[in-house]
Amino acid sequence: MTTRLSQLFVRTLRDDPSDAEVASHRLLVRAGYIRRQAPGVFAWLPLGLKVRRRIEQIIREEMAAAGAQEVHFPALLPREPYERTGRWVEYGDGLFRLQDRKGADYLLAPTHEEVFTLLVKDLYSSYKDLPLSIYQIQDKYRDEARPRAGLLRGREFSMKDAYSFDYTDAGLDLSYQAQRDAYERIFSRLGMEYVIVHADAGAMGGSRSEEFLHPTAVGEDTFVRSAGSYAANVEAYRAPRAEPLPVDGLAEPLVFDSPGTPTIATLVALANEVQPRADRPWEAADTLKNVVLRLRTLEGDVELVVVGLPGDREVDMKRAEVAFAPAEVSAAGDEDFARNPGLVKGYIGPWSPEGAVLGETSVTGIRYLVDPRVGDGTAWMTGANLPEKHVLSLVAGRDFIADGIADIAEVREGDPAPDGSGPVELARGMEIGHVFQLGRKYAEALDLKVLDENGKLVTVTMGSYGIGVTRILAAIAEGNHDERGLIWPRSVAPFDVHVVATGKDPAVYGIAETLVSELDGIGLDTLYDDRPKVSPGVKFGDAELIGVPLVVIVGRNAAEGVVEFWDRRSGERRDIALHEVLDAVRAAG
Amino acid sequence: MTTRLSQLFVRTLRDDPSDAEVASHRLLVRAGYIRRQAPGVFAWLPLGLKVRRRIEQIIREEMAAAGAQEVHFPALLPREPYERTGRWVEYGDGLFRLQDRKGADYLLAPTHEEVFTLLVKDLYSSYKDLPLSIYQIQDKYRDEARPRAGLLRGREFSMKDAYSFDYTDAGLDLSYQAQRDAYERIFSRLGMEYVIVHADAGAMGGSRSEEFLHPTAVGEDTFVRSAGSYAANVEAYRAPRAEPLPVDGLAEPLVFDSPGTPTIATLVALANEVQPRADRPWEAADTLKNVVLRLRTLEGDVELVVVGLPGDREVDMKRAEVAFAPAEVSAAGDEDFARNPGLVKGYIGPWSPEGAVLGETSVTGIRYLVDPRVGDGTAWMTGANLPEKHVLSLVAGRDFIADGIADIAEVREGDPAPDGSGPVELARGMEIGHVFQLGRKYAEALDLKVLDENGKLVTVTMGSYGIGVTRILAAIAEGNHDERGLIWPRSVAPFDVHVVATGKDPAVYGIAETLVSELDGIGLDTLYDDRPKVSPGVKFGDAELIGVPLVVIVGRNAAEGVVEFWDRRSGERRDIALHEVLDAVRAAG
């Protein structure tokens, strides 16, 4: 099919939109693909919609190949199913909520686990009906606190969300793998680089969970990967737990005065001055920092917890959120300390000469968790829980016993991969897909059971698999552009080829018309710049901005049977015989 | 492509859903096409989605043929543009409204005039950019007071809405005609009967407006049509206005006592008893009934208005709503009469022996409107606005003068078509499409102007064109079923052919497998009932329920090369040679 640029509903802009932070947003607006309607809410012009449809088509084909069937749910859903799984509350401010004229509560669904579960419950009742994988491509809503970067984090966005239903764990593994394989094929066909990282299931519940991250500097996610096969979202990275060490012969705790040591650095400096150690100077890593956190459960209950971690590391609050989910976590405030006079601020430690300070059986009763590096038999310098006093040679497992592990310290370049595949490096990525083993969480909450081979009711186990359609589009734009405009991969370009006729000679336009009808004849989708009164410079600028990867320029040599073949990506322009254009375009595909 | 029924996500139901009032709803649920999520909100199973996609495809092809380009807007839109056109308020309770986390107002769009207008304003600025027609196929929301009849009146529904933009009235006429023609082609391809009726633009504003009604007993709209070319929604029917008659020689008003005449019938009976007329008995049509209505403007102002109409007709409140829109209209209540003691309830008339009672310059100051049949020179029996008194021979234009016309009386079979094409008949229909000339209402409210040929800024004139995708699907189901199930027209059937293999003989299934792969080979979309353990009766029942129009039964004679060819619509089943199936299926298309 041929689309004439003179007729196309588009307007290219010379200037960047003022609110655009990233290249994809800037260029998709400037090239006339999308327009903002509200923060994080966009309208799609014909060019944008064409790219979107091509991405959707690839996803549909691979979903079919994976045996998933398409269904379609409304965005507007009743509160009740989300109430039953707790997500009506858990989503907090992130959920768009509304009431109908009768005062009944509704939401704009951010994801559809509940209603897919109920639909399967409605239709199916036997193990013979399973496995089942169903999906939809649908507009979703999240009331992001800070919608940003155009389509990369919108409040309205299109997703493919698929759900699998099995009655055995082995079945779930197969369904999960089928979706995971389909995702690999989808991203390959889209020409997108991706890394599959371990992820934390977070508020979604469930067990196995992996994210497909597209490495990019504008990504919101940080991930780690080793030279080996290990890759994980930082939230999912698990530091190896220190092996227990023998305590025989270790020095006894030594309390010392430490006035004026508000920071780890000042404490270390003081120690090196007044309590120098024999082998090497004291370092921040020798100190045990005790961070007081405040947890707030969904029911509104508040608990203080103290986490001990090596003094050279900060708490990563995103990791802490995951570790303590679904409770909300924040740093303890003055009122928390006021309510717990047993904690000596600035000098908190698990032990004092007066006895155990932290831990569920201690005098304060406050839960004490430690970093995985704080293994039994390790010795630390830490607060003595007395004003202006610290303690040396405090040994984990001997002088204090933690209630458990909290792996919430920041992850650093060079930290070991938990699978032993060497040190990790840190990188930025954008989540473009996510595969989850939800397990039986939703089926239990909504009572989805089937009869198994023995006539026994068993709870169904589920998987949830999401791909952000509009985010992928933006990610491709982000990774495929130069300073002059977009450069689409052929698989998702709005057109296969862009024919530009230049000058004012009607004969040139006649030749171009013949060419585009020939391209049409071989089934290509062609954009034809037929505007007679627009200068070649403006036409070339528009071609660069719009970003069809292959441009054919029909100009003054056309009468002699010569046109220009322009590879938008390499920038190469070369003369080519008119009669060779069809073959050349085919070959470029 | 072949879909195996053993794998298809579907479950047919033997029983009707309890909440289903109409056949389409009942059968679409029973055959596994849709499932209810909330009142007027449905999920689409694979079968339903396939039919929906086929309807959408036909619409897209005809929109392209009409030169309309596809775009896509979100359902979630900010309040501001709807505020500027007044529709934020006008829609009343019918609009789903919500707030984001910052308290900003949003709506779920029931229609998109405002944002299409703003998008064109954003992109275009010259007459050279016009005409433009753009459309979307998108899920819309209306908070219906009484969602009913399944998809026929849902709260979430899919629509194709198109908008045209021109800078001259003649251009709008052409754009309107192009959409109107496309609608005719769409409904013809869908095999749907339709009547194009004059419609009232109502809250949408604008001038020319026509509805495409599908005649059906379950339709919510009543329309009239003459044997000639006239057809109109009853709301848009306009009674011909009576020609003025000479008043010379007409009797003077005669007041008479009329106690105990609470109804028109009792009044007529009394008149025939105490004041008989010479030529014929008094009839209800000789009386002038004065109905007091209460109008409430959008701003909340209340006005009483009295409408005089022949006593043999009732007020049609839907016609009254249209006539007085955007004000809300209701019957006056006791408090209204209490506040207007000048009105003598039960005996209201425009005139009394004491002078003019109704009319803007009268003693009450209440606006008085009359039915078009109450022409100057017509004489009436009506209330004398005195307790227990009526008046005879009260002549319009002589004894009272109305402030205007209110054409709100019920329309009756046999009323004259306003274009002189004879008497009308009444019929029920369902609105399946609507074409509007909006004119400059939205462009003015949102300041959409372009420069014309002379460099002068002119306001753009617009059209709005809607087709209900999900409603059409239901309407087709409503018109294409029997007591055993659905019978789809081939153009929208979920599959081209349904192959049913029966019995337990593996050889039969082998033959069926070969057949479906041959059907696949000629590009047909086939549903294959491959369930080995299901009885033929259940399989045939499912085939009837699902409603693929062409069924091929591969049974015990298959080994001899004979299968059964079943026309679902006629019910005819005939033997056919296996090798002739492909030709027969092709021929049936």
Image (tube, coloured by chain):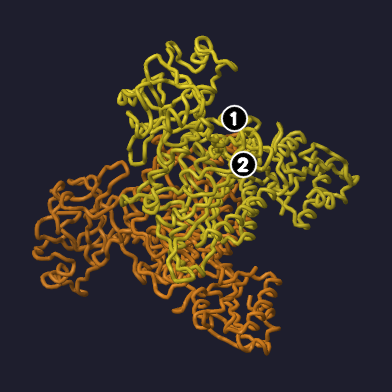
Chain colours: A yellow, B orange
With respect to residue B454, does A183 lie above or below?
below
With respect to residue B507, does B367 lie above or below?
above
Q: Residue at x 28, y 42 (%)?
A: B300
Label 2 sits on what residue type?
Answer: Asp
Q: Nearer the viewer, mark 1 or mark 2?
A: 2
User: SS class of the residue under badge 2?
Assistant: loop
| Mark drawn on residue A412 | 1
| Mark drawn on residue B446 | none
10 Å crowding of disc 2: few (<14), some (14-19), many (20+)? some
Q: Position of residue B150 (x, y in %)?
A: 41, 64
Query: Is any part of residue B362 visible from this angle?
Result: yes
Seen in the image, is B95 located left or right of residue A150? left
Label 1 marks a residue whose chain is: A
- Quadrant containing the C terminus of chain B in the rendered view: bottom right
Marks 1 and 2, the one that precedes in the sequence = 1
Labels 1, 2: one chain: yes
| Mark drawn on residue A419 | 2
Q: Position of residue B11 (x, y in %)?
A: 48, 70
- Quadrant containing the N terminus of chain B in the rendered view: bottom right
Query: Is any part of residue B65 visible from this angle?
Result: no
Label 1 sits on what residue type?
Answer: Arg
User: SS class of the residue under badge 1?
Assistant: loop
Q: Residue at x 17, y 71 (%)?
A: B277
